[in-house]
Image (cartoon, coloured by chain):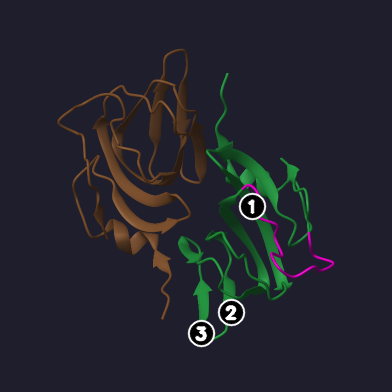
Chain colours: A green, B brown
Amino acid sequence: MKEKVVLAEKFTLFDECWTPKILGELNDSYVKIFKAKGEFVWHRHEKEDEFFLVIDGELHIKLKDQEILLKKGEFFIVPRGVDHMPYAPQEAHVLLFEKKEVINTGSTASDKTVENPEWL
Amino acid sequence: MKEKVVLAEKFTLFDECWTPKILGELNDSYVKIFKAKGEFVWHRHEKEDEFFLVIDGELHIKLKDQEILLKKGEFFIVPRGVDHMPYAPQEAHVLLFEKKEVINTGSTASDKTVENPEWL
């Protein structure tokens, strides 16, 4: 039997922020979620575009020359090669769509780097 | 300036059902939305998995041996090669994620086939 995914349920399964969890795969990409609070790290992905959809709360994405504020039901695609730094003053819940080889901190090694995200 | 996308706004820009609209592209995929009401057509995509996330309302996806009911905030990935038939008793708003070459009715030519979806 194939199963649907209830996003709200998945967000109850973990507390930590900035640790992407894999919920599904299609083609060469993963569907992931993460919780955001505070600042992430400046980084970029040289070869992959990255999709952020806010499920709950508000996520800011700083770029070098502008800042995107994403509220619930809003998405933004960070193009490949573009430096970005997500942050969230209050906890936010985010759905990510990205190629399987993407590492969360991209070009920037950090204590927030997660090399092999957990499946939920 | 790069722009975010507000899903609720995009759904106000068209009325017709089963005509996917492109909202963005990343890597080799498009982010699309569509409105669903009534029955679509049985079809499959031989080489591409397809992601459906319900933004509003309820979408049913019939498979040959089971049926998935997706409510708001729930997603399902139809694996490549799997026959499926989406339907919605009441209007539903859906976000799609699929490879650029995917045609909505897959292997089944139909009056619902949209070869070149419009960008919104």
The CA distance from mark 2 to mark 1 is 19 Å
* Residue A66, disc: 3
Where is the N terminus of chain B found, in terms of image quarters?
Answer: bottom left
In contact (CB < 8 Å): disc 2 and disc 1: no
The CA distance from mark 3 to mark 2 is 6 Å
Span shown in magenta: A100-113
Q: From the viewer's perspective, is the residue at label 2 or at label 1 nearer?
A: 2
Give SS at disc 3: loop
Q: Earlier in the sequence, mark 2 or mark 1?
A: 1
Q: Earlier in the sequence, mark 1 or mark 3?
A: 1
| Residue pointed to by mark 2 | A62
Residue farthest to the top?
B65
The CA distance from mark 1 to mark 3 is 24 Å
* Residue B54, disc: none
Q: From the viewer's perspective, is the residue at label 1 or at label 3 nearer?
A: 3
- The amino acid type found where label 2 is placed reads Lys
Q: Nearer the viewer, residue A117 or A2?
A: A117
The subunit carrying tag 1 is: A
Residue drawn at the location 56% of the way across and 73% of the way down:
A82
